[in-house]
Image: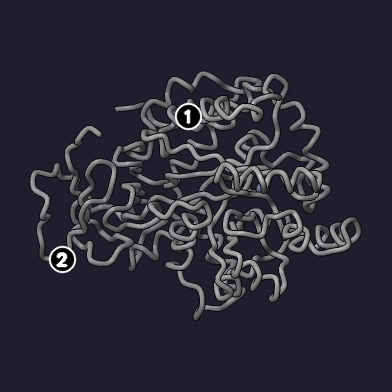
Amino acid sequence: MDQKQAIWIKDPLAILADGAERGIVVRNGRIAELVPAGREPAIAGAAVYEAAAHVVLPGLINTHHHFYQTLTRALPAALDRELFPWLQALYPVWARLTPDALDLGVTVAMSELLLSGCTTTTDHHYVFPAGLESVVQDEDTILADSERVVARHHQRGEDAMVQIALAPCSPFSATTSLMSATATLAARLDVRLHTHLGETEDENRFCEQIYGCRPLDYLEQCGWLNARTWLAHGIHFNAAEMTRLGRAGTSISHCACSNQLLASGCCPVCDMEEAGVAIGLGVDGSASNDESNLMQEVRAAFLLQRARYGVGRVSHKDALRWATKGSAACIGRPELGEIAVGKMADLALFKLDELRFSGHGDPLAALVLCGAHRADRVMVGGDWIVRDGAIPGLAPLWGRGGEGGKTMVPVVHPPP
Ligand SMILES: [Zn+2]
């Protein structure tokens, strides 16, 4: 690997790490040193990035999304509906998805996520438009396609960080044989498994009617109840089921905004964690959020879970932990989600110079409580991908507007 000059991210206003009061040194894509109070870096010759105006977080990790849905937000036909009728309203629209629209949706989602401080994301994709029917039949095609997109956006890009997981939409939209074969294939290829589960009470009723058991029993019968699997939502599990999830090492992507918008319920996050279940955060598809802003999702999860469990059990630091270390556990990437020596240099730096932060006391708490919305700087694998709240290089995509000349890509500043 080429040796890159080390960067000292110096004297941050605040940082989500202990013993790094004077910042961190990044080298060759990794965090090489934490610099404690009163000290200078041991690594000599690092370039200095002055971070006195920045709050530094580990890059946020999004564990559940459907990128194509960024093109169908706040659709009138889907407003004020719960999950099943909401899906019925949207499926005819999604059936008209084209490869170009999908490409645009991916660009929008990844840009929006990056600007919110997200450095690693999943895309649970299950709608394949005409022209892309065969894409999942060929592992090389998937990887080439994913790498092309990731290369464009630099999210966990450079050193081939694209990771494939097998992810049928839900156990109730796939056959039992497909679910079982998917688990077998995942074990053979050593990849992770992902699907929606425990999202609504309707789902419990449907499963009992069709299969004569609860959704988690069915998942287990299909060979999915293991440490490869992370599940989106996980709202409607009982205490015994949470214990089984914890014992199996299955983790949960908590999607607070989506769950509130569709009135699906509230994931029992603290009970889950007590049962040994790792909790990550997901923005979910933009038809049920309707934004792809992971920092806002941190705030939503914090508020929702605090309302459920009280001030003694949920702090802003818990919500940040779910979006970082917890999310890294969901996707099986222990090298991510933490500012510690040896971890990937994925960082999100926020400034507190917006009106929304006026009068703030604790800078870390202010990010969550005052509603930080946009990162000023984002580093992925040691490279600055967002600068001054913008993505350099995104400008050439500006002209690719939607129908009626409406711009469907984010409005960003031109590169310096
Ligand atoms: Zn979803």
For badge 1, the amino acid type reads: Glu
Residue 32 appears in the figure? yes
For marks 1 and 2 on the same chain, the one whose residue lies earlier in the sequence: 2
Question: Residue 224 placed where, x, y %?
Answer: 68, 55
Residue, disc 2: 37
- SS at badge 2: loop
Quadrant in the picture for residue 73: top right
Instruction: Decide: few, some or many residues near mark 2? Use Cα within 10 Å; few <14, some 14-19, many ≥20.
Output: few
Q: Is residue 122 above or below residue 203?
A: above
- SS at badge 1: helix
Q: Which mark is residue 147?
A: 1
For discs 1 and 2, the disc positioned in front in the rendered view = 1
Residue 263 appears in the figure? no
Question: Residue 235 placed where, x, y %?
Answer: 69, 64
Question: Residue 368 placed where, x, y %?
Answer: 44, 61
Tell me the quarter of the image containing the C terminus.
top left
Tell me the quarter of the image containing the N terminus.
top left
Q: CA distance from mark 1 to mark 2?
A: 40 Å
